[in-house]
Image (spheres, helix red, strand yellow):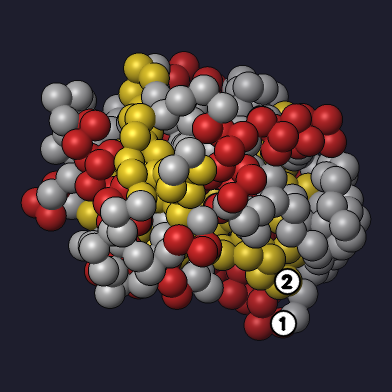
Amino acid sequence: MAPSAPETPRMPGSVAIRPWRAGDDRALAQVLPDPGSPAQLAARALLREPGEEPLTRTVIAVVGSVVVGAAALAASPAHPGRAWVHVEVAPEERRRGVGTALLDAVAAEAAGTALEGLGLRTRLVADDPEGGAFAHARGFTDLFTTRIVLIDAGALGAAGLERAEDLQVIDTGSVALTRAFAGWYERVNALDPAAPMSIGQVNARFLSEAAGAHGAALWRPDVDGAGADINKRPVTAFAVSYAQRRDETAEAQTAGQTAPGQAAAGQAAQPQTAGPGTVDASARAGEDGEQVFAVTGGEDATELTVGSIDGNVQDLRSLVARLSVDTPVVVEVTDAMETESALVEELLASGSARILTSYTTLVRDPQNGL
């Protein structure tokens, strides 16, 4: 959401707002800057043809017959209390009131639908003062910041290497993994509550091949040293791998959409980037705008979603250490992930990890008006 600064004059009479038409996606691609981050790419994917599944409303700003901007509202089945919103205007038309007019117009389009009366949610790259000023001036507040962090191969040394019996490499269809992920996801999204989901829904939405998940690992320590069956031990941490394939990335970017990729937990993925540590503006978001993971972190880096179940940073450290012995890994952490953030801070402080990109999620509650 980056159309203008807060002081916006009345929209000039030369600009009109109209419904979406066939070909508007190609027209927008001609006038909007290339996405500079995964967060921007995922947000841009919301600017699409209106539909009912998921429920989406989109409007277009034009000068004469030239498309100069768009706004979209989209339902979020995973977080139904707030709808995704994205407003974007061609750089030369910003600071003229076009963004505000688009936001008002797409709200009007949503009247009488299930989108009406919902809170709103949007994402901005962390260093986007113009977009932040626009959003804050219109009632949005920061919810949390997400960091995408590259952890160097071997950064955690031998942590966990002596505990091979505690690592379980497992299929992403595992019930143990799905239950662990479900509880973790609910906890770390307490500020933006998730919808009640069955085990099957959690797996389909976040852990399936369609979601981009390809491999997983669980940390299941033998707490009493009795050598109990690993399948009967509690899960204290997990990791799920995601990666982007070259053909799917190119096709998704050409279409202005997102696509899943594949990798295996603990093995080197092959993300396509310019070089180690560079950010590839590819993203994986479902049709409802929910993002499982959003960036490739460099040649041979494996993208992992990692989570601590019980807050034990040592177990999380051991799991990540086992998966990053020979391969750098990229992890995504938010302010709400206390244990995960603690591990990342430790690695950043030691110089063995670096932030590739970060973005902020902002929200506006219903009382501020749709």
| Amino acid on which the number 2 mark rests in the picture | Ala
Q: Residue at x 31, y 59 (%)?
A: 12
Which quadrant would residue 227 be assigned to in this image? top right
The residue that disc 1 covers is 350
Q: Residue at x 56, y 42 (%)?
A: 28
Q: Nearer the viewer, residue 250 or 235?
A: 250
Which quadrant would residue 278 be assigned to in this image? bottom right
Q: Can you give x and y, in whole percent of width and height, for residue 281 in the image?
A: 69, 51
Identify the mark at residue 353; answer none if there is no mark: 2
Q: Can you give x and y, in whole percent of width and height, for residue 27 in the image?
A: 58, 38
Q: Is residue 287 above or below residue 303?
A: above
Residue that extends furthest to the left in the rendered view of this protein? 367
Element at label 2 = strand
Front of the two marks 1 and 2: 2
Q: Quadrant of the N terminus?
A: bottom left
Q: Can you give x and y, in whole percent of width and height, for residue 186 in the image?
A: 36, 41
- The local crowd at label 1, few if under 14, some if 14 to 19, many if 20 or more residues have their Cα within 10 Å, is few
Q: Nearer the viewer, residue 263 or 26?
A: 26
Q: Can you give x and y, in whole percent of width and height, for residue 254 in the image?
A: 72, 34
- The local crowd at label 2, few if under 14, some if 14 to 19, many if 20 or more residues have their Cα within 10 Å, is many
Note whether residue 266 is visible.
yes
Q: Is residue 238 above or below residue 340?
A: above
Q: Quadrant of the C terminus?
A: top left
Q: How far, Cα to Cα, is label 1 from label 2?
A: 8 Å
Left or right of 85 on screen, residue 172: right
Note whether residue 177 is visible.
no
Left or right of 354 on screen, residue 11: left
Q: Residue at x 45, y 61 (%)?
A: 93
Left or right of 137 on screen, residue 234: right
| Amino acid on which the number 1 mark rests in the picture | Ser
